Amino acid sequence: MKDLTTDILIIGGGLGGVAAALSALRLGKRVILTEETDWIGGQLTAQAVPPDEGVWIEQVGCTATYRAFRENVRAYYRTYYPLRPESRAEKELNPGAGTVSRLCHEPRVALAVLEGMLAPWRASRQLELRLHERPVAVETDGDRVRSVTVENVLSGERTVLSAPYVLDATESGELLELGGIEHVLGAEGQGETGEPHALPEADPLNQQAISWCFAMDYLEGEDFTISKPAAYDFWREYQAPFWPGKHLSWTLCHPITHKAVFRDLFGNPDETPHGGDLWHFRRIFARRHYPDGAYPSDITLVNWPQIDYWLGPVLGVSEQERQKHLEGARDLSLSLLYWMQTEAPRHDGKGAGYPGLRLRGDVTGTDHGLAKSIYYREGRRIRAEFTVLEQHVGVDAREGLLGAEVFPDTVGIGQYRIDLHPSTGGRNYVDIASWPFQIPLGALIPVRSENLLPAAKNLGVTHITNGCYRLHPVEWNVGEAAGALAAYALDRGLTPRQVRNTPQHLEDFQRLLEGTLGFELRWPEEQRLTPSPGF
């Protein structure tokens, strides 16, 4: 078994992990970054989810590197794709013209851009990127993490990695469990948080639905019908007690009102934000951007309510139970595709089924056709020096106060509604208005551990506030701040909590974030006082 050391060790190559590496590298630190799959990028790539972003993202609401990522995606399409002149000239080009985001794009393009952003550091060997490696053990000494053992998922070879600072950028907060770091899983109770929308009692197994996303295109007149999934008959008849129709149907639940909503595949090609049919909702490739005949079809990404799997959690359970629910999520996604190909009512009234729907595993980089990884909406979260509650960001919970809580230790900003999908505890959507918010440094500092930092969705938020802190640009900001914090503390021989709790160090660190790294720490007043809209 090999031993390797570095300045900053980052476990997990998702958005937070990549962003953490970028900030640490820019501040002169050597970095080892590991990733379990063969694609860095997490939500955007291995999970295949195009960006969910705030309404002002083109003007304000993210770090400079996240903004560079977005513009590099557009530049990639302008450079390598045969766009129509009018599409090429669009300043805010949306390659997929999806209605969920102002920047919908293919996973492989995100992968290419992220690899390009890391390439200079790999060339100098300041960064070592280790793919196909998952953490299997964490060694601790008192309040410090000494090392993380990773295992290559292909060869089984193990390597012990050590560094003065270790960042957990995994999708589910795996190092927190392996290292015995104090953390929360699932839903807190009202007695602990006092949040209006918290459950009466804590329930660690009440976790948001997971989704196994997939990409597809459509060729009318052809037949790409897959084999009938093993669990299809179950899913064909299944209806949750809180859902207005069968799971495999065009009858959905409005996330705010919980009333029935009809939304089919092709019936309403409205391209306004969150409008229209399901095809246009998360479309990642729009053929209208190209000359006639250049491409036979759009490509859309299926991350819809019909593939939200809530029959049981995959965290905090036995490996057998976990695998059972992962398989269940896989079968649900394939069952939706089979239902759409064979039985779904057509928008044109011509019978049932769209056999021309074609699974695009080439787009997601898999032989089985689905994304490489499930989409985690939440995982384990550190018990932090400061925990963001609904009372800090929720419009109703702040009882008429204007704006979110102002945090003097801010290390970034974000904006999104508190948006929780149905949960494994049988609870429907929790989708409530929130104010544009800040990311407090205290939420990145564990209550005890001195050298492990959260760098993804595992910061000090609750089951409720995770609903607005879990989106792409916020995860990026959290990771980038964690990488910078580790580098700053390492340079000065400080602990992260000393940085936060010493006024001069906090001021210097925030100046570094804003000046050197291009962070946005405070919302302009107009946006700060505008609640995140619903739809």
Image: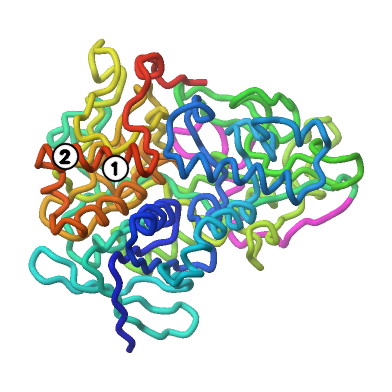
Residue 95 lies, in percent from the top left, at: 69, 40
Q: Residues within 10 Å of mark 2 (few under 14, many from 20)?
A: some
Residue found 48% across the figure and 43% down from its top: 66
The magenta span reads: 222-249
SS label for mark 2: loop
Q: Which mark is residue 423?
A: none
Would you place residue 239 above or below residue 375 in this image? above
Residue 97 lies, in percent from the top left, at: 69, 34
SS label for mark 1: helix
Scheme of image coloration: rainbow
Q: Which mark is residue 386?
A: 2
Q: State the quadrant of the N terminus.
A: bottom left
Closer to the camera, 484 or 278?
484
- Identified by mark 1, the residue type is Leu
Q: Nearer the viewer, mark 1 or mark 2?
A: 1
Would you place residue 408 above or below residue 35 in this image? above
Residue found 91% across the figure and 39% down from its top: 292
User: Magenta segment, principal secondary structure?
Assistant: loop
Residue 403 seen in this snapshot: yes
Residue under label 1, please give it.
Answer: 512
